Image (cartoon, grey):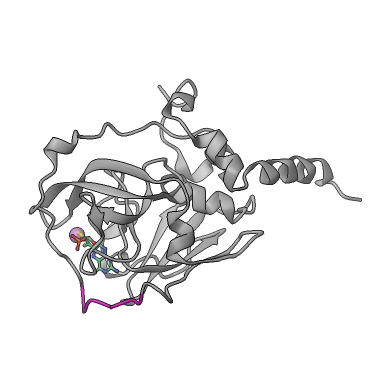
Amino acid sequence: MFPNSHKSWQRRQFLQLSGLSGIGLILGGCGLVRTDNIIGKKFEPLNESVESLLFNPQKLVPEFPASAIEPDALIINTFDSTPELDVKSFRLIIDGEVNRPLNLSLEQIQLMPLTVMTIRHVCVEGWAAIVQWGGVRLRDLVALAQPKANARYIYFKSADDYYESWDIASALHPQTLMAYQKNGNPLSIENGAPLRLASPIKLGYKQSKWVTKITLVGGLLPEKGYWEDRGYEWFAGL
Ligand SMILES: Nc1nc2c(c(=O)[nH]1)N[C@H]1C(S)=C(S)[C@@H](COP(=O)(O)O)O[C@H]1N2
Ligand SMILES: [Mo]
């Protein structure tokens, strides 16, 4: 009668574990990263389930020391005009294939564990910059929304009409952040305040600024991303 009842029971257990405090316990330390089932394997993001990705964090990309930060090297790159978002009324929506849709203030997001990383930002137009980003891991936000098992891609909607889509594995990588700090300071409006994507595993154009909505989906839509729909490659991995 309910062929999936055993599976969905396990799933409920998992989801209970993945509340905010639980996820901190599971994902709290680099020491817990399991590399045994990653090393020597080809990266196959499209076959991985949300559940296995949340339990088995992917391999970390080496970071730079803070002394390597290039404070002036990050070039503002915005396709149109800069939207000015009011921080007080700002909300981040997380919806789509989730059991618990979220509507979070910046204050709530900033109560979650802060991750700081110094990485290289690479723009397809031929420049790069070592930047330190601080923010919340996207995987923690996704876990909080209780993703459904069929979630495979994530869309990001920005306040300037920019939009992007990512494979779920890249989105749940431990170094994919929703950042609100740059080089130790609050993010500037030009760099995407209050909240932007930052990750060492994707090209610059995947890293949406001014993100207001995150939507989990089972399949890609005809619209894949602002630049992708104008001919750029979709995966754009580094
Ligand atoms: N919303 C939005 N996000 C965006 C863009 C944009 O035009 N709008 N440009 C992208 C590109 S091509 C790059 S290289 C980086 C640049 O980030 P920065 O302006 O903070 O240097 O933002 C990315 N995210
Ligand atoms: Mo870019």
Secondary structure character of the magenta stretch overall = loop
| Label tally | 0
Residue sitting at the far right: 1
- The verdict on residue 85 being magenta is yes
127 horizontally vs 219: left or right = left
Q: Which quarter is ligand 2 in?
A: bottom left
Quarter of the rendering occupied by the C terminus? top left
Residue 16, position in %: x, y?
70, 45
Report the residue at 76% width, 42% height from top.
7
88 horizontally vs 190: left or right = right
Task: Find the magenta span and give its range.
Answer: 79-86
Residue 128, visible in the rendered structure = yes
Compared to residue 141, the image places residue 58 above or below, namely above
Q: Quadrant of residue 157?
A: bottom left
Residue sitting at the far left: 72
Residue 83, position in %: x, y?
28, 78
- The verdict on residue 76 being magenta is no
Residue 34, visible in the rendered structure = no
Report the residue at 44% width, 34% height from top.
58
Of 120 and 37, the residue lying toward us: 120
Q: Quadrant of residue 227?
A: bottom left
Compared to residue 3, the image places residue 66 above or below, namely above
66 horizontally vs 58: left or right = left
Report the residue at 17% width, 65% height from top.
77
Compared to residue 4, the image places residue 81 above or below, namely below
Residue 163, position in %: x, y?
36, 69
Residue 107, position in %: x, y?
44, 62
Report the residue at 21% width, 77% height from top.
80
